[in-house]
Image (spheres, grey):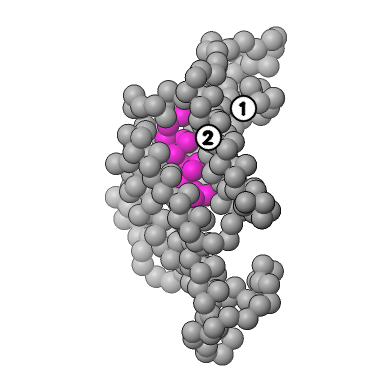
Amino acid sequence: MKFVGYVRRNSPIHRLDPRTKLLMMASIVGLSFLFPSPIPQLALLSSIILLSYLARVHKEFLPRFRALSGMVVAAFFLWSLFYRYSLFSGGGSSEVLFSYGPITLDTFGLFYGLSMALRVLVMIGAPLLLLMTTTVSELAGALTKFGVPYKAAFTFGLSMRLVPSLADEMVTIKEAQSARGLELDKGGLISRIKGYIPILIPLMLRAFELSDRMSVAMGLKGFGSGRRTSYRRFELERRDVIALALAALALTLAALLKLGVL
């Protein structure tokens, strides 16, 4: 199962302008940093899951969350147990629930650890949903519309295409080496690291081969020479204006709540 990949569907989210989707996901990530409480984080996470159902990609989206369970649990325990030693600790006091040596678990750390675990899901879930509902070419076109130089946008799109390809190449090389008798799951840590050398060397050679072919193809097509034109034109429609207005309203209300105006 590929962790990141475009899922073709005919849904309202897919039909949105890529600039709209990019701004919406950026606003969701921005909102997750405004409030340290787990309740707003849970609301944002619920909105992402609701958008995945609206985009009809929930069957592909939700299993990715299950793959992140180990990282989320680790983030929860680390922030809950060692929050008071971080730079974000306010130095306040709260009810101590558990204490053993330097490890102390209090009520504030417990809630903050839960908030950070949910924030991890929000920060990964929003870009993941964007990549599952937007093609790489659409993202590159949206970045150029925002004023990003075309070469930088093209490099971003190229990296998004190459990373999954190299991941598939690594799986193929690993299966081929395992069929030849290479054992990667036996021995200590050092021996396991050394066991990946026969995989990394062919992978690097394959990456150099792909980059050489790509540079030749780009040169033959005249990349970087002359004025660049685009086949597809992005235009904001009524649904895009409504989505952007809702995102702006959510950011405005969140900022007013943070400042104590509301």
Give the foreground label among 1 and 2. Answer: 2
- Would residue 213 be visible to someone looking at this image? no
Q: At x 59% / y 86%, what residue is drawn?
A: 102
The image quadrant that residue 147 belongs to is top right
Residue 131 colored in magenta in the image: yes
* The N terminus: image quadrant: top left
Check whether the beta carbons of the residues at disc 1 and disc 2 lie within 8 A of each other.
no
Badge 2: few (under 14), some or many (20 or more) residues near its Cα, within 10 Å? few
Tell how many labels: 2
- Considering depth in this image, is 7 or 108 the residue closer to the camera? 108
Say what amino acid the circle numbered 2 marks.
Answer: Leu
Residue 181 colored in magenta in the image: no
Badge 1: few (under 14), some or many (20 or more) residues near its Cα, within 10 Å? many
Say what amino acid the circle numbered 1 marks.
Answer: Leu
Up the image or down, 23 lies above or below 202; here it is above
Q: What's the mark number on residue 246?
A: 2
Magenta segment range? 122-134
Up the image or down, 183 lies above or below 10; here it is below
* Residue 170, position as x, y percentages in the image: 42, 44
The image quadrant that residue 211 belongs to is top right
Q: At x 58% / y 61%, what residue is drawn?
A: 36
Q: At x 63% / y 22%, what residue is drawn?
A: 145
Which secondary structure, mark 2? helix
- Would residue 152 be visible to someone looking at this image? yes
- Please give the residue where the numbered disc 1 appears in the rendered image: 143
Up the image or down, 136 lies above or below 181; here it is above
The image quadrant that residue 230 belongs to is top right
Q: Is residue 70 left or right of residue 242?
A: left
* Residue 83, position as x, y percentages in the image: 59, 73
* Sequence-wise first label, 1 or 2: 1
